[in-house]
Amino acid sequence: MAATLPKRARRTNGLFGMKYDRDAVKAWAGDSQWRALQADLARFRLSGYTGWGSEGFWALALFRLQKVVNSCRPKWLWMPAIVLLAVIRKLLVLAISVDLHPSAEIGPGLLIAHGAQIRVIEGTRIGADCALNHVCTIGAGTKVGGANIGDHVFIGCQSCILGPVAIGDGAIISPCSLVIEDVPAGATAIGVPARILHSVRAKGLSF
């Protein structure tokens, strides 16, 4: 049986009118890219953005559509759509510089606050209710593999997460940081290379 959101967090006003509950959205969305997209839009609106007018949301919408089409079988029958979406993705990357690889895994409720110079490579896993700011790279390091990022993670602007590092739930990656080692849940990573601060939290941080 599919998980349901608490009453305050259920979709109430038509197709795109769900109320966003960051603690329940992962269970509500499950493996559905359609529900994940609804959660993305609700997260954008909760944060004061229109969603449809945000470059980051369009990149997410295309990413989720590619995930659905790429999983359809028989694959040869869907090949024209797969190729068309790949071309559209390339054009969109050239236009807005937000590159979300369709082989990455991105949980529901991702907020891309300012869509510019963002790259997420193949093999990356991003949990639910995360925030990704502009000029960020989640990319390849000296070891093979992509990052495994938990839920409710804030990734500040001009930061890099390289290689198969693990970032725990609720962690904060401070702006202008280079993360090449694991970050525990609830910790703050800051600096180049990033140092781990277990007791420092930004007061009033809301993302």
Image: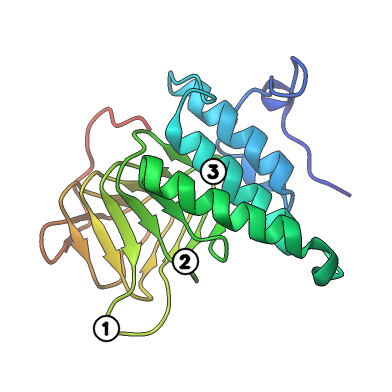
- Residue with the mark numbered 3: 60
Q: Residue at x 89, y 49 (%)?
A: 1
- Residue with the mark numbered 1: 142
Mark pair 1, 3: CA separation? 28 Å
The answer to whether residue 121 is above or below residue 90 is below
The answer to whether residue 161 is above or below residue 17 is below
- Residue with the mark numbered 2: 124
Q: Residue at x 67, y 48 (%)?
A: 65
Residue type pointed to by label 3: Leu
Lateral position of residue 131 relative to residue 116, left or right: right
Q: Earlier in the sequence, mark 1 or mark 3?
A: 3
Q: Which mark is residue 29?
A: none
Residue 35 placed where, x, y %? 71, 40
Q: Residue at x 57, y 66 (%)?
A: 103
10 Å crowding of disc 2: few (<14), some (14-19), many (20+): many
Can residue 28 be seen here? Answer: no
Residue type pointed to by label 2: Thr
Q: Secondary structure at mark 1?
A: loop
Lateral position of residue 172 relative to residue 145, left or right: left
Disc 1 + disc 3, Cβ < 8 Å? no
